[in-house]
Image (tube, grey):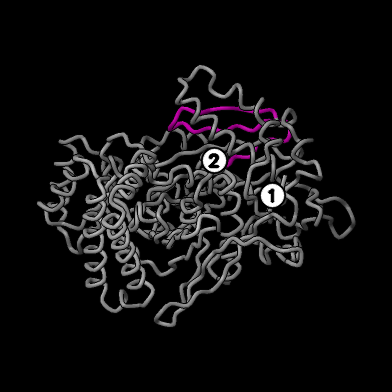
Amino acid sequence: MMNSHSTRYLETRPRRNSSGSSSISHIITTPTSSTPSLSPTSDMPSNLEDLGEGVRHVHINADGGKPKTRTAHGRKASSPMMPAFIVSAPGKVIVFGEHAVVHGKAAIAAAISLRSYLLVTSLSKSRRTISLRFPDINLSHTWDIDDLPWSTFSHPSKKKHYYDLVTELDPELVAAMKPHLANVSPGAPDEVRKVHQNSASAFLYIFLSLGSQSFNGCLYTLRSTLPIGAGLGSSASISVCLSSALLLQIRTLSGPHPDQPAAEALLQLERINRWAFVCEMCIHGNPSGVDNTVATQGKAVVFQRSDYSKPPVVTPLWNFPELPLLLVDTKQPKSTKAEVAKVGDLKKVHPEVTGAILYAIDQVTISAANLITSGQYDDDEEVGQAHLGKMMTINHGLLVALGVSHPRLERVRELVDHAGIGWTKLTGAGGGGCAITLLKPDISKERLRQLEQDLDDEGYGKFETTLGGDGVGVLWPAVLKNGTDEDDEGGVEIDQEKFLNAVGNDGVERLVGVHGKDGERESWKFWRVDAN
């Protein structure tokens, strides 16, 4: 168990680049005994009016106890059932800097418009269960709320609050949770069951940390348009959905709303990100924190960890442009561990040559970051896009030189080059996995359709997506206008049946996607931070 002096807090610091414009870096620091702790009262959001009737009267106790509300006559206020709502978070790709980042260099990761969606449905007070449903991986499990280990998680020495930063899992809490994971998917193959239990443990750990035994019964139903295990941050996307949903349920998030000050929006994003990182620890053990950061805030980040005895520095690129992207899944199994080891071995045998390649990759990353932060991209978007595309091509060539590509990845590049529609590189560890293509402006639909047909014929998966979009978003309540007769009555209410019956990625996006055929759907709201 960590004491108060060993807890690491996330600070947000302004950084100034060569052009004089400022950005914000997140640096995890270890406070001394003189470092003030976060105040549960000063840290409270100032505006809760978007969260439904009755929420604006909530007061959070400093001791983390149950919120109390009173009417003007001193009577205890009623606690109306929350409406069904949906939260959504994006996946991510590494745009620049793979493998070099392992050796202390910088990397750029950016959000993509493939997303996870979590529908949260409250049950009547008499139903004392919580259910986690993830039909895309055939996970469905229900727990009795009163059977869960509340006494362990709520003990004064263990209790965490919504504003806390948790940098490691508590072994005693993990042990207390273990019996409640034993009967998750008992008949599934070992590999599938491991995925299910990791997902369930992430959910239970933060549910027990943030919630209380008085929590209402609830259904948590998850759909994702992200390929699982393809290096696209699917687990982080899910973790951000779970974190934001629970923080909304305990009414500790402000907004999102269009007039929200940037500092307040940033605070909400940081709070969501902290608990998403806890989920990621449950799933991965020792995550870098990059994936959940991108899934939370969207846009892009520069990530660097030059000294592994110190925390990483993550610098948001709030003005990263939204760019058209073709994502291609080679469907070739890969091992991140094996590819990282391959580069490590090469560096041992040929340290100077390998070091020069890693340095060159770092320069590519810096060139791209400087273009975006300096404002040059906005001066001429077509020239800026070509600059980024050429940097992607160079980055891919350097990764080939490190030996981390694969014939299936090279074939994607050949097909794209032949079609002449963009710039392609592998993304992630390589050895299989995915490739990304930054599409050139004004590419004809016919040429793109022909390329996609060629990819289909050779057994690739493909997704037309957008790079650098929004992070976590909220649909409150779960009602959307979908171009049907129901729009005249306020829109379509998204219930469990509709959500579960949506067929495939296209069905999910048509039903609840943050973007419809006419652009962004106005009902979705996001915590946005203005780069200026």
Residue 136 inside the magenta-drawn segment:
yes
Position in image of residue 531 (x %, y %)? 46, 73
Callout 1 amino acid: Ile
| Drawn side of residue 338 relative to residue 385, left or right | right
State the mark number for residue 395: none
Q: Residue furthest top?
A: 187
Q: Kindly indicate the quadrant of the structure image that contains residue 207.
A: top right
Give the magenta part as a residue range: 119-144
| 480 to 130, vertically: above or below | below
Of residues 240 and 506, the one drawn nearer to the viewer in this rendering: 240
Callout 2 amino acid: Gly
Which numbered disc, 2 or 1, marks the residue that appears first in the sequence? Answer: 1
Residue 449 seen from this side? yes
Circle 1 packing at 10 Å, graded few (<14), some (14-19), many (20+), is some
Circle 1: element type: loop
| 309 to 143, vertically: above or below | below
State the mark number for residue 285: 2
Residue 518 seen from this side? no
Residue located beneath label 1 in the image: 250
Circle 2 packing at 10 Å, graded few (<14), some (14-19), many (20+), is few
| 388 to 115, vertically: above or below | below
| Drawn side of residue 61 relative to residue 517, left or right | right
Position in image of residue 171 (x %, y %)? 67, 37
Q: Disc count in the image?
A: 2
Position in image of residue 481 (x %, y %)? 44, 51
